[in-house]
Image (cartoon, helix red, strand yellow):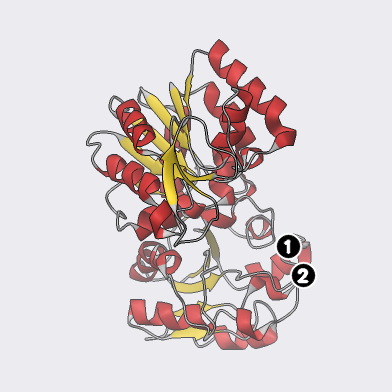
Amino acid sequence: MKKTIRDFDLRGKRALIRVDYNVPLDKELKITDDNRIRATLPTIRYALDHGAKVVLMSHLGRPEGKPVSSMSLSPAAKRLSELLHTEVIQCSDAVGDRVKQELSRLEGATQVALLENLRFSAAEEKNDEAFARALAQNGDVYINDAFGSSHRAHASIVGVTKHLPSGAGFLLEKEIRYLGEAMSVPRKPFVAILGGSKVSDKIGVVENLISKVDKILIGGAMAYTFLKVKGVEIGSSRCEKDKLELAAAILEKAKAARVDILLPVDHLTVQKVEAGALSRVEGPSISPGWLGVDIGPKTIELFRSALDPAKTVIWNGPMGVFEMQPFAKGSYEIALKLTRMSGATTVIGGGDTAACVIGFGFEGKVTHISTGGGASLEYLEGKELPGIAALEDR
């Protein structure tokens, strides 16, 4: 069990909080989705309510170790200021004398500051010892609330914990609880839903899940590699030919473990992936020149029925090209089913799946939506995340 923000006396201290404000920006550098900022508000408010001055740090984009004005965290500071109804100091850098001077303003009404993009220094991604020590000088207690970055052994995630007392924020604690419990002590039956474009992205997840789940439902483009192994014609659908043997081995492993793997029995198909494309339902085989872009109506019913008895569900990867509205029905229907499973623990595993469920307006209607893409995947693979391992044990 890791320490959390509740385990520290914060009065009069500076809480150095690692957040994940790697938010999408449009051409005018306006934030198009502020969910990651909103998700950190409970931790920030707790720290302020308990007498702390708050110093936040995050990365944004891939500036390759040098300052890039379009990747400044200024838009995040502005949005956070609006959400907290208080001034947020936007620092000029992450470390150094000028930053110390800027942080000296943390008094009275102004008690929140945001350091500039950590990745403006190459030392961040190298987990540089001197950079980690300099970051630690900005706080008295370190709190990690950035699950989405916790699979990276970076200075602000791992290095800083060597210099300050450390614990988890509420968002990180929630991720550990829901993802951790689902993987270690799931209520049965336990069903996993996997989708997305590549089998190669999910190999570790599938192999780890086989020893834990009762059923795996596979949709998205990754399903076609498995269907090909089973001798089903897949037309022009995406197939990872170099992963066919691996897909066959996974099917055998699941069979030996008595885990049912359910694959699509019909598909929404097109000849060209564009929103206005002529589409038709085919299945289980797909005609030459046509490719699958979503699961079909029979598969939706098959998957919904398979979910009926489930007490724990983890979903990682959309069922089709959900970004295009005509090909989003499969993902929508699965998401809708999860919102209606009263008494079941329903966990959405970050990345595109989270975007898809939030986009459908189902936030708050499932048990937990993970804020981590790569971090969620690695957690589901059973890997220890460096950012969690580095925190102090209670």
Q: What label sits on residue 125 in the rendered view?
A: 1
List the residue tagged with mark 2.
122
Residue 221, image x, y percentages: 55, 42
| Quarter-of-image position of residue 339 | top left
Q: Residue at x 62, y 86 (%)?
A: 92
Q: Classify 10 Å Cα crowding around label 1: few (below 14), some (14-19), many (20 and above).
A: some
- In-front residue for pair 64/305: 305
Rendered position, 155 above or below 207 = below
Rendered position, 83 above or below 151 = below
Rendered position, 63 above or below 210 = below
Rendered position, 145 above or below 89 = above
- In-front residue for pair 253/235: 235
- In-front residue for pair 196/22: 196
Q: Secondary structure at mark 1?
A: loop
Q: Residue at x 63, y 34 (%)?
A: 203
The residue type indicated by label 1 comes to Glu
Residue 218, image x, y percentages: 49, 33
Q: Secondary structure at mark 2?
A: loop
| Quarter-of-image position of residue 224 | top right
Q: What label sits on residue 56 in the rendered view?
A: none
**Can you see residue 392?**
no
The residue type indicated by label 2 comes to Ala
* Disc 1 to disc 2, C-alpha distance: 6 Å
Disc 1, disc 2: CB below 8 Å? yes
- In-front residue for pair 336/35: 336
Q: Residue at x 35, y 39 (%)?
A: 346
Residue 253, image x, y percentages: 60, 17
Q: Residue at x 77, y 61 (%)?
A: 126
Q: Is residue 283 left or right of residue 132?
A: left
**Can you see residue 72?**
yes
* Number of numbered discs on residues: 2
Residue 178, image x, y percentages: 41, 41
